[in-house]
Structure formats: C-alpha cells, structure tokens
Amino acid sequence: MSPTIDGVFSGSCTALVTPFDGGQLDKDAFCNLVEWQIESGTDALIPVGTTGESPTLSHEEHDVVVELCINQAAGRVPVIAGAGSNNTAEAVRLARHASEVGADAVLSVSPYYNKPTQDGLYQHFSAVAEAVSVPVIVYDIPGRSIVKVADETLVRLATDYPNISGIKDATADVARPTRIRNLLGAAFAQLSGEDATALPYLAAGGHGCISVTANVAPKLLSNMHKAWTSGDIAAAQAINERLMPLHDAMFCEASPGPVKYAAELLGICSAETRLPLCEIAPASKARVEAALRGAGLMN
C-alpha cells in the first residue's frame, strides 16, 4: 500500500457512492466499484461520506459498507471511513467501529443543522480524536453544515490532538491551502472536497482531492494527480479542462443524484437514491449524459 507522499494522504481519492437495489444495499455493485477504483489508480477510498448518502443509512448499513470497503480493498489502498454525525456520541461510535475493523483513517464532518460555535466544533472533533488512534480528517463543508471550521480552530485541534492530521476542504477557497500550510506545515494533509477547484487547490499547496467525479472517471483523475506530482503541469491542465463540464454536471442537482445517474449510464450501479433525494430531472439527465460524452467516457 502506498497511500501517501511523505506520510500524508494525497492524490486522487474517491468519495464512493453507496449503490442501492430496490431500497437495499447493492453489495456486489459496491464491491465491484471498489475493485474498479483500485484498478484505475485511485489513491484512497472514502465510503459512507456525503456522496455515500450516510444520513440515510442505518447504523447497521453504515457499518456493513465500511467493512465491505475494507475487505475488498484488502490493504491495497487506504480506506478513510466516513464517521460523521451531528450527534457527537454517534460520530464517536462510527469512528470507533471504523478503527476497530481496520480503516486507515476516519473522515468526520462538521455537525450539520445544530450550528455549533467554534468551541462546540472543537469539543466535537476532540471527542472523536480521543476515541480512536487512527488519523482523523476534519471535513469542512459549510455549504451543507452552515458553520465553517475556522483556521484557528483547526490549528487548536491539530496542536492538541496529533491524530487530527488533515482536512477535507469543501469551501472552494483556493487561497486556504497556503494559509493552512503556513500555520500547520506540509505534513498536515489538505484534501480538496470540491472537484472543480482541485487543481488550483494543489497549486496552492494542497495534497489531493476527495472526489465525486472519480466515481465515474477514476483513471482520468488518477492520471491528473500523477501528472501534477511528476511536474507535467500541461498534462494535468489538459485533463482538468476535459473534465470541467463533468465536474459541473455532477452538481447540477444535489449530490449524489447526478453522479449516480452517470454511474447508471456507465453500467456501474443503479441511479437509485434514498429520500429526500429523488430521481434527477430530465434536463439534468441530459446534461450529465452530454458531459460524459464530452469527456470521452461514453460513445
């Protein structure tokens, strides 16, 4: 397993969809997706995050998906298991389970809906970090959780808890990696959570991206990150330009609706989501299909 550069999670990491079939987990489709991701050069796998529809999974289903991912990956790439909740006790339970069954790290989202203060965020992530010994990646996504994790709070957390060792940054602020690098150094993993700005995020000092688009374009995104790391900036830019319409299409409606429809078009899994997410609109379907064709992913 070669998950990192200098011990830091990096490269093209996929926020995996959770396939459903008739309302139930489609375990075979999920394991096939994991295998395809690894074969395509994906650097790390992230089950049961936002893209994995974690809020709609039962605790049992959540645990099953994490275990399926770890077992299928079999140590070939790291698994950063989603372990987020707006209930701190539940986040702690999810993190402990992931750690116990062999996850390489956990991804913990800032609590949504509750709207905690910065001190509340600090105490929440502290509880998760104290519960496990594996690395904890803080997931900052104010577009869904309302409250942003302030840089000062992140510094406080990383200083007090050595296993808080990275951030998934979905703010689309491409100046932020440089600021955080100045505050916490190059060994603090910075992973973009926003596909369309992943390349400028790397240019500002980021290490990689936890990607939605990589569910359907894993090889291209793996190649983009490898090109960047090797210094072939022109090749990385060319792939980024090719995929930009697809990145945009993946968020034409609430994710993961569009990426699941794209996955269905490519024969990966059903487009089925769980309420309150529903089938995407005909115009959105047309946009997703056009973007896949434009990227050369469909004939």
Image (spheres, rainbow, N blue to C red):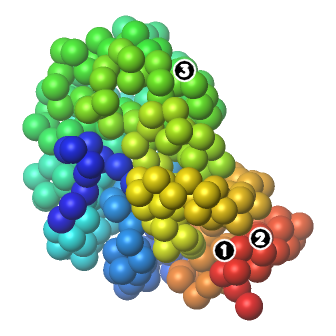
- Circle nearer the viewer, 3 or 2: 2
Identify which amino acid the numbered label 2 is placed on. Ala
The furthest residue to the bottom:
299
The correct choice, above or below, for 261 with respect to 103 in the image is below
Q: Which residue is mark 3?
A: 147
* Label 1 element class: helix
Decide which of 202, 250 is in the foreground and name it. Answer: 202
The correct choice, above or below, for 154 with respect to 205 in the image is above
Identify the image quadrant of the C terminus.
Answer: bottom right
Task: Find residue 291 and name its label.
Answer: 2
- Which of pointers 1 and 3 lies earlier in the amino acid sequence? 3
Q: State the image coordinates of residue 218 (x, y, percent, origin top left).
A: 49, 70
* Label 2 element class: helix
The answer to whether marks 1 and 2 mark residues whose Cβ atoms lie closer than 8 Å is yes
Identify which amino acid the numbered label 3 is placed on. Val
Between the residue at mark 1 and the residue at mark 3, the CA separation in whole angstroms equals 31 Å
Between the residue at mark 1 and the residue at mark 2, the CA separation in whole angstroms equals 9 Å
Does residue 241 appear in this view? yes
Q: Quadrant of residue 286?
A: bottom right
Decide which of 132, 216 is in the foreground and name it. Answer: 216
- Which of pointers 1 and 2 lies earlier in the amino acid sequence? 1
- Circle nearer the viewer, 1 or 2: 2
Q: Which residue is mark 1?
A: 262
Does residue 141 appear in this view? no
Decide which of 292, 128 is in the foreground and name it. Answer: 292
286 horizontally vs 77: left or right:
right
Between the residue at mark 3 and the residue at mark 2, the CA separation in whole angstroms equals 32 Å
Residue drawn at (61%, 70%) of the image = 260
